[in-house]
Image: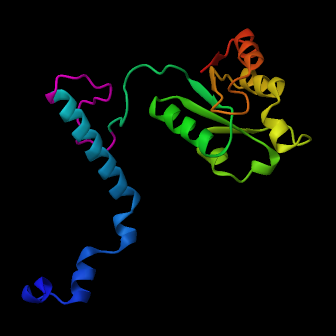
């Protein structure tokens, strides 16, 4: 046993590793993500590729972790629910866009509502699915709150041409 040869007992070895919660602390994860970003940036530089994510000081904890290019939109709405909406919002955040979510009354405690910078409840008088298919209400929320682009995710309104047309008429881009 190598631990015994070095004079470490099993309990000492476990204590020296630290607890699982300290390994998964937010600060540790931030440093891990930053290190991954730095590795990707350096490997792209070595291969002569450009990266959008650059900062003046890569060692700075407050450095922008993603692109410093101009934002494509100030506000991006995820016109969907659940994991799909969460992924859209994450992508929007990585691009520096404000994110907007919509939710039905039944989804008021779900993750996608809390991941958005702003979230708006759709009509509670409709069924959960019907609320996400209510084009007029979704477009009204966009116009009233300065949303510049809507990503429909998949399903629901993603293949609805009248939704894309209605958004275009009101000056909102369909992503």
Q: Quadrant of the C terminus?
A: top right
The answer to which image quadrant residue 77 occupies is top right
> Which residue is pictured at 72% across the width and 28% down the height?
157
The answer to which image quadrant residue 143 occupies is top right
Can the viewer see residue 116?
A: no
Whether residue 154 is in magenta: the answer is no
Mainly helix, strand or loop, the magenta region? loop
Q: Quadrant of the N terminus?
A: bottom left
Q: Viewed as shown, does residue 120 lie left or right of 97?
A: right
Q: Viewed as shown, does residue 161 lie left or right of 99?
A: right
- The number of callouts visible is 0
Q: Could you say which is closer to the camera, residue 27 or residue 17?
A: 17
Measured as percent of width and height from the top left, residue 89 is found at 56, 37
Image height of 46 relative to 169, above or below: below
Q: Could you say which is closer to the camera, residue 132 or residue 15?
A: 132
> Which residue is pictured at 56% across the width and 31% down the height?
98
Residue sticking out furthest to the top: 169
Whether residue 54 is in magenta: the answer is yes
Residue sticking out furthest to the right: 125
Image height of 56 relative to 90, above or below: above
Can the viewer see residue 84?
A: yes
Measured as percent of width and height from the top left, residue 104 is found at 79, 43
> Which residue is pictured at 43% across the width and 19% down the height?
70
Measured as percent of width and height from the top left, residue 159 is found at 70, 23
Q: How is the image coloured?
A: rainbow
Which stretch did the figure color magenta?
A: 46-62
The answer to which image quadrant residue 151 occupies is top right
């Amino acid at each position: 046993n190598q631990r015994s040869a070095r004079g470490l007992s099993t309990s000492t070895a476990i204590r020296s590793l630290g607890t699982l919660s300290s390994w998964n602390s937010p600060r540790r994860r931030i440093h891990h993500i930053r290190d991954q970003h730095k590795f990707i940036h350096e490997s792209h530089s070595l291969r002569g590729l450009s990266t959008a994510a650059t900062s003046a000081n890569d060692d700075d904890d407050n450095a922008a972790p993603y692109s410093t290019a101009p934002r494509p939109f100030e506000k991006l709405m995820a016109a969907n629910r659940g994991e799909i909406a969460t992924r859209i919002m994450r992508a929007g955040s990585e691009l520096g866009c404000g994110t907007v979510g919509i939710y039905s009354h039944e989804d008021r405690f779900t993750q996608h509502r809390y991941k958005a910078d702003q979230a708006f409840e759709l009509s509670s008088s409709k069924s959960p699915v019907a609320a996400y298919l209510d084009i007029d209400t979704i477009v009204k929320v966009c116009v009233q709150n300065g949303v510049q682009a809507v990503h429909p995710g998949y399903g629901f309104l993603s293949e609805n041409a009248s939704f894309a047309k209605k958004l275009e008429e009101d000056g909102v881009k369909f992503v």
